[in-house]
Image: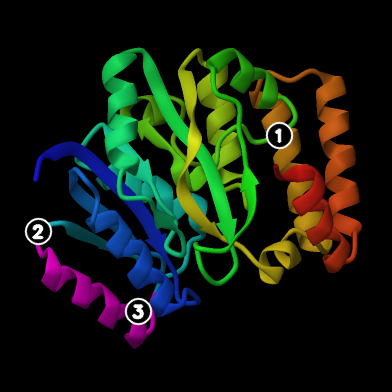
Amino acid sequence: MNSVDVSILMSVYIKEKPEYLRTSLKSAINQTVRVKEIVLVLDGPITDQLQFVIEECQKECSDLIKLIPLKENVGLGKALAIGVEKCKYDLVARMDTDDIMIPTRIEKQIAEFTSELDLTIVGSNIDEFYDSPESIVGRRVVPEMNEEICNFSKKRNPFNHMTVMFKKSAVLDVGNYQPMMGFEDYYLWVRLLKAGYKGKNIQESLVFARTGEDMYARRGGKKYFLNGLKGRKAIYQAGLGSMSDYLISCSAHVVVSLLPNSLRGKLYEKKLRN
């Protein structure tokens, strides 16, 4: 099998389900082109069950998985910033530990970087599922070309985080991931776009993204509400949007945050997803 100079970057913490991690890692391992490394940040102590899954996958490909253990949980932004620093290769593919890549994900993203040398970020759409990727419940479609991506970023996140492949050098140039609960990725993207780096989204779903009631619950409540206002202010200050864009974005955030969980789920499925 051909191999490519790509690092896959993942971060796992104690509450992840072992069966989800196993499926996610195997989807990363079983790509049509082999990456050179999977950098797995252990964000604080993990369970014996999660450790067992990691060791199981290491036996399958001992030279592939590079563990970065952290003594304590530091949160996604800091964990990914550490992970980016540890990645050996300039092309870094992000992946979440509960999602599933299609087998050709890496191959298709490499093809985009090869054909358009000025690209810095390449993402894709996602298909969302509850229990099985064979039963799709939603799809998040993001704009394809850089101009559309820049305009979209003024009010909403223009990339699906778990689909993105980016250039490490550019990410470090704009300050890497920052602690910004719930907005770690969005805050990074707007800084890259503001700095003139070019993005693209492949118009197909390269990742099956796990969703459910708990996802909608996490997008509500006082903590999410306050973190969201803080995050959107930082995104406005660092990004391309106007004051009008900022106010519209904040207004939508207020509505979504304060809705009951069941109504929030329906809103995501009907209005915020395709």
Q: Which residues are magenta?
A: 45-62
User: Where is mark 3, residue-wise?
Assistant: 50
- Report how far apart the C-alphas of labels 3 and 2 lie in the structure: 19 Å
Which of the marked residues, 3 or 2, is nearer the chain's N terminus? 3
- Badge 2 amino acid: Asp
Q: Which mark is residue 63?
A: 2
Residue receiving disc 1: 156
Q: Quadrant of residue 213?
A: bottom right
Q: Percent x, y for residue 141?
A: 62, 37
Q: Nearer the viewer, residue 262 or 90?
A: 262
* First in residue order: circle 2 vs circle 1: 2
In this image, 52 relative to 99: left or right? left
Residue 120 in the figure: left or right of residue 195: left
Crowd class of label 1 (few under 14; some 14 to 19; many from 20; radius 10 Å) = some
Task: Please rate how many residues cluster around mark 2, counting C-alpha atoms within 10 Å: few if below 14, some from 14 to 19, many from 20.
Answer: few
Residue 253 highlighted magenta (yes or no): no
Label 1 element class? loop
Q: Main secondary structure of the magenta part?
A: helix
